[in-house]
Amino acid sequence: MSIRERLQPALRAALLHLCASALVAALAAALVFGLWYPAPYGALAGGFALFTLVVAVDVVCGPLLTLVVFDRRKPRAELARDIGMIAVLQLAALAYGLYSVAQARPIFLAYEGNRFRVVSLADVDPHKLSGAPPEFRSPGYGGPRLVGARLTEATDPNFQQSIVESLQGLHPSFRPERWVPYESQRASLQAELKPLAALKSKHPQALATIDGALAEHGLNDDSAGYLPLDADKADPPDWVVIVERATGLPRAFLPLDGW
């Protein structure tokens, strides 16, 4: 059998494998970006980069292995065993990749004093979840929820320790014992909101983008404000949250420096 005669059926088999792999990857993407990382959290929590790496390796390696092992001269049982092993390995790799993506998923958008912060599952010590209010003890798989983070006062006994922990990267939003219902901090948030005129003055090149985001949600400069967003894994790193003043609810996210 010539190389051409060997490669033609192997290429067809690899192409079919590639199509099947792409379909599985599309279903996985619907789960990841439709539920765990809804827009814009794919960018805010690093979901795009992690999922792309997982899927690229999985989708490419499976068909390549099929191209290598597929040979019609093999007995049917042996060929089926080889392709089956590749499929099992590929599915196992995808399952592990999805597990890794799930462990890094955002679970909260937290209001923390003068900012919002994205809280991923990996940011939280699971052993401390029992210290959270009952409604927040189970992160769930339904996408990020709104939560408030109670800040310590200067009169609190552990005030200095709290400052040290924050400087070490353990922000109040990452500590389950500090979580409170978002609604309980609505008045504080509304008082902290910055005027959109300040954001427009800081980013004159983004006027159309800002006005477009406001119009999309039926808002204007008077009915909305903004706060900076801290998201360590964000790409790009600087974002703001546009908030409806009347309800205190986030309505839009823009990749702009809000500080």
Image (cartoon, grey):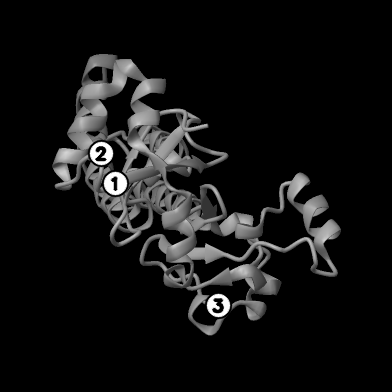
Decide: is 147 above or below 256. Answer: below
Q: Position of residue 126 (x, y in %)?
A: 65, 69
Q: Which amino acid, mark 1?
A: Ala
Spot occupied by residue 58 in the image (x, y as percentages of width and height): 41, 40
Residue 53 visible in rendering: yes
C-alpha gap between disc 2 and disc 1: 6 Å
Label 2 Cα neighbours within 10 Å, binned few <14 / some 14-19 / many ≥20: some
Q: Amino acid at mark 3?
A: Arg
**Residue contact at pointers 2 and 1, CB within 8 angstroms:** yes
Above or below: residue 24 compared with residue 207: below
| Residue occupying the far bottom of the picture | 134
Disc 2, disc 3: CB below 8 Å? no
Which mark is on residue 221?
2
**At 65% from the left edge and 58% from the top edge, which residue is drawn?**
172
Judging depth in this view, the residue of 244 and 102 nearest the camera is 244
Give the class, few, some or many, for how many residues have Cα within 10 Å of label 1's Cα (few <14, many ≥20).
many
Which one is closest to the eye, mark 2 or mark 3? Answer: 2
Query: Would residue 10 be seen by someone viewing this image from the given angle?
Result: no
Q: Which labelled disc corresponds to residue 137?
A: 3
Quadrant location of the N terminus in the rendered image: top left
Q: Which element is circle 1 on? A: strand
Residue at figure coordinates x 31%, y 49% from the top left: 33
Write down the residue under mark 1.
224
Q: Note whether 99 is above or below 259 in the view shown.
A: below
Q: Which mark is residue 168?
A: none
